[in-house]
Amino acid sequence: MNEVVKHTSHQFDEDLKRLKDSLVLMGGMIESMLKDTSDALLSHNMEIAQSVIDRDNELDQLEKRVDEQAIQVLALRQPAAQDLRFVTASMKICTDLERMGDIIVNICERLVELSKFSPVKSYRDLPRMMECTGKMITKSIDAFVNLSMELASEVLQEDDEVDALFRSIWSELIEMMRQNPSILEPGVKLLFIAKHLERLADHTTNIAEQVIFTVKGLDVRHSGHLKPTP
């Protein structure tokens, strides 16, 4: 009987590891896609931007794999307590990662469109915003891998910096378009990019919140403080 229990426990651990590995792979893809997007922005290299767009299907396939693995664990292993929270959080994180991939693709599509216009402003703030968001993504994935409350909390705090950069870029572009209506079209596209980056950071905070939920069973969504789940 003990051998059966040990065998089942080992398989369960392996199932959880495969699920985590698949999510880490998705997270790594997101990091790589955003880095290449930043490179495309700085170098005005639209071939790089197009290569990011072309990777979206691969990310979608990974999403399906994670969903299948998570459903299999729920159906066959019937996890409880923290293991159950880990599996349900993994499914939510998977959704966030897939949406982050879509957002990055949207940014690259806007970059391709912008390449037809003369630059309307320095791209200093947008790369900085991308850099801050990229660091948040890396930290959120590390928080998930290590189930680190400390890293997850740092991600939530760092979102304020991205929000501040977004407000600065938004105000500056609105004023520039008001003074020079001829840059309206490329200016609006830059506004969309800034908004996409702000949304990317929001999804990253969602991942951090799921880490906190997994570790402590605390629901910190839509609140400025920790609160226990019912």
Image (cartoon, grey):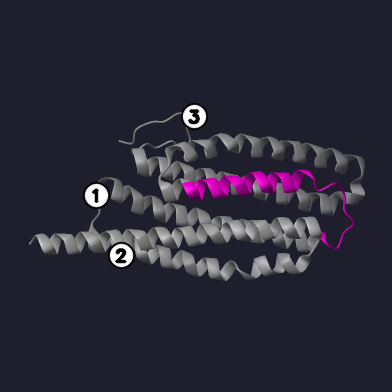
Q: CA distance from mark 3 to mark 1?
A: 28 Å
Where, by quadrant of the figure, is residue 174 drawn? top right
Location of the N terminus by quadrant is bottom left
Left/right placement of residue 171 relative to residue 37 reads: right
Q: Secondary structure at mark 2?
A: helix
Amino acid on which the number 3 mark rests in the picture: Gly
Quarter of the image for the C terminus: give it. Answer: top left
Residue bearing the label numbered 2: 72
The disc placed on residue 224 is 3
In magenta segment, residue 121: yes
Place of residue 24 in the rendered image (x, y in percent of width and height, measured from the top left) = 47, 58
Amino acid tagged 1: Ala
Callout 3–callout 2 Cβ contact below 8 Å = no
Question: Closer to the N terminus: mark 3 or mark 1?
Answer: 1
Magenta stretch bounds: 114-142
What secondary structure is the magenta-colored segment mainly?
helix
